[in-house]
Amino acid sequence: MATPSIRDFDFTGKKVLVRCDFNVPLENGAITDDRRISEAVPTIDYLLNHGAAVILCSHLGRPKGGPSPEFSLRPVANQLSSLLYRNVRLLPDCVGDEVRDTCQSLAAGEVVLLENVRFHPEEEKNDPAFAQQLASLADFYVNDAFGTAHRAHASTAGVADYLPSAAGFLIEKEIKYLGEAIHDPKRPLVAVMGGSKVHDKIALIDNMLPKVDRLLIGGGMVFTFLKAQGHEIGKSLLDAESVEYAAGLLAANPDKIVLPSDVVVAPEFKADSPATVVGADAMPADQIGLDIGPASSASFAAIILGAGTVIWNGPMGVFEMDAFASGTKAVAKAMAESDALTIVGGGDSAAAVDKFGYADDMTHVSTGGGASLEFLEGKELPGIAALGKRN
């Protein structure tokens, strides 16, 4: 069943509860990256311009046991006021008499932001009574929080049991780009995978490998594959329980899977540890692998530049440290320069393209790390599956 869109409904005079993902990074109370806020603006603007009063809700961080000032959405309300060119009032809570009275008195064109829904433990438990309290604030529910769509919480899924509902433009965009990349890609389809453990990517590999033309593997997980080939990996990260799985993949897909031919190693996992380049089959026993090497970066880039579609999930090395960032930067640069449809699957990969200044050159940078991973694994996302129940 197609996911219902806000384009299909009349919002004149309606109060609309919109679940956004405003879980943004903060330093000393200041927002350091407002991408998740700015990505929500098109949906909010559309609703306001079509006669709705808008009630926004989100979580921020992982508060435990109740309200915590450091997890207040106050900075988000201030940033939204700037982006929407209108005052966005932050309400003192997300439920209760005061909140309900305020929401009932909202006029078309007004917008408020509820305080952090995770100040209530009932949110993550998907408590029906709590979901009903949220639903009682509005006439319609819109989910535009792709970053939490893989969570069956009260504000991401439960509310849809009690209100007519639809997806916002951000969720539509995520479904479009991630879905097309998997189901109807322009070929060759190249997947680039990194990250730490093979075990964490098994579901992703199993879903993607039959679909892709090439699978490029880097990051910490590559050393489990090198171990499966019988190579020395020194003090590098090893996912011992996945060695047999990796060996089976390599045997069954010799022409699809591309491993690095060289790696960057160092004596210790430290930013100032002296880095050297060695062959992937010649790692010293007293060294730790922390990045793919320059020859591998060049060969990965060449494959990416010849692709029709590229999906990237996981860095090639410890890109937070300059000495071990070259492989990740090379992948980002090649994707930015490619004519391919380029999809960055959120999380650390999104952080990397931001760091290196290539985010605007990608076709799509997902706002959901865990959600994009589960979507690419072929899993149903509860926050999307719930939409349309009451329409």
Image (spheres, rainbow, N blue to C red):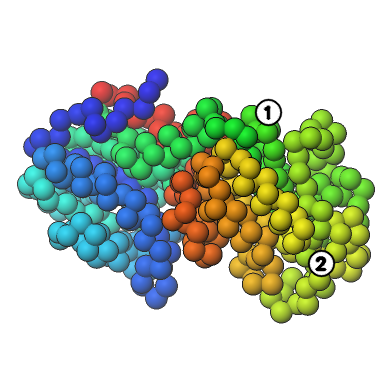
- Amino acid type shown at disc 2: Val
Q: Residue at x 24, y 59 (%)?
A: 83
Residue density around tag 2, few if under 14, some if 14–19, many if 20 or more, within 10 Å: some
Q: Quadrant of residue 11?
A: top left
Q: How many marks?
A: 2
Mark 1 or mark 2, which has the lower sequence index? 1
Considering depth in this image, is 140 or 209 the residue closer to the camera?
Answer: 209
> Element type at marker 2?
strand
Percent x, y of residue 223: 80, 53
Considering depth in this image, is 50 or 87 the residue closer to the camera?
Answer: 50
| In-image side of 337 versus 8 (left or right) | right
Q: Tell me if residue 225 can be seen.
A: yes
- The residue tagged 1 is 210
Quadrant including the C terminus? top left
Considering depth in this image, is 26 or 36 the residue closer to the camera?
Answer: 36
- Amino acid type shown at disc 1: Pro
| In-image side of 326 versus 74 (left or right) | right
Q: Residue at x 69, y 38 (%)?
A: 214
Residue density around tag 1, few if under 14, some if 14–19, many if 20 or more, within 10 Å: few
Percent x, y of residue 90: 21, 60
Residue 116 vs 217, above or below: the answer is: below
Q: Which mark is residue 182?
A: none
Residue 217 vs 264, above or below: the answer is: above
- The residue tagged 2 is 277
Quadrant including the N terminus? top left
Q: Quadrant of residue 166?
A: top left
Percent x, y of residue 352: 55, 60
